[in-house]
Amino acid sequence: MKFETLEDLLIQEIKDLYDAEQQLVDALPKMMEAAENPQLQEAFRTHLRETEQQVTRLEEVFEELGVEPEGHTCKAMKGLIAEGQQMIKAKGDGDVRDAGLIGAAQRVEHYEIAAYGTARTLAQRLGRSRAAELLQTTLDEEGATDKKLTAIAEGGINQEAAEGSWQS
Ligand code: FE
Ligand code: FE
Ligand code: FE
C-alpha cells in the first residue's frame, strides 16, 4: 500500500469495506439459521437485506470516486466472522448461544461503524459530499442495527439465558 493523498486512503477504506460487506452477505444467513429467538432471526434477516444494499451503495461510492469497484481483503472481518462461527457451532443452551451470537454480531457492527465513520469523514474532508452522504446512510443503518441488537439482548435473551442458569 502506498498513500500519497487522502483520496488514496479513502479508496483503500472503501475497498476494505467492500470486501467486509461481501463477507457479511455470506455470513449473515448462517447467523440467522443458528439463532433460536425469532426476534433475533428477524434482525439478522433484515440486516442481510440491508447489507446487500450496502454493497450496492459502495459501488455507487466507487462510481462517485471514478474508481472500478474492487475489494481488498478485510482481515478484521475474517476474524470477527471466525469468532461468530465459533458461536454458531457452540453446543448447549440455545438462549445462551443467542446471547453469544448477539455479542459476535455487535462486534461486527462496531467495526463497521468505525470504518464507515472514518470513510465518511475523509469524503467530507475531500469535498466529496455525495460519497459522504452515501457512507452516512450506511453508517446510520449499522448504528440502528447495533441498537436493535442491544434491545433484543436487554429485552429477553439474556433474561431467558439467566433463567436457564437458575434452573440448572
Ligand atoms: Fe454493513
Ligand atoms: Fe478491514
Ligand atoms: Fe452491519
Image (cartoon, helix red, strand yellow):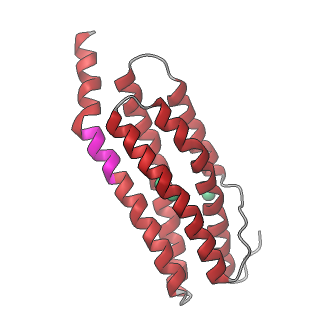
Give the residue displayed 52% in from the left and 56% down from the top: 51
The picture places residue 91, in percent across and down from the top left corner, at 48, 18
Residue 153 in the image: x percent, y percent? 29, 39
The quadrant of the rendering that contains the C terminus is top left
In which quarter of the view is residue 73 placed? bottom right
In the image, residue 79 lies in the stretch drawn in magenta: no
What residue appears at the point 65 percent right and 75 percent down from the top-left corner? 62
For this rendering, which residue is in front, 131 or 56? 56
Q: How many marks?
A: 0
- Mark yes or no: residue 47 visible: yes
Location of the N terminus by quadrant is: bottom right
The percent coordinates of residue 48 (x first, y second) are 49, 50
Percent x, y of residue 108: 49, 49
Q: Give above or below for 13 relative to 145.
A: below
Q: Residue furthest top?
A: 168
Against 116, residue 80 (above or below) is above
**Which residue occupies 46% across, 61% down?**
113
Instruction: Out of 25 and 140, give the one closest to the viewer.
Output: 25
The majority secondary structure of the magenta stretch comes to: helix
Q: Which residues are magenta?
A: 147-154
Residue 6 seen in render: no
Q: Is residue 128 above or below residue 10?
A: below
Q: Residue at x 29, y 32 (%)?
A: 157
In the displayed structure, does residue 94 sit left or right of residue 153? right
**Residue farthest toward the bottom in the current orientation of the protein:** 127
Rendering quarter of residue 45: top left
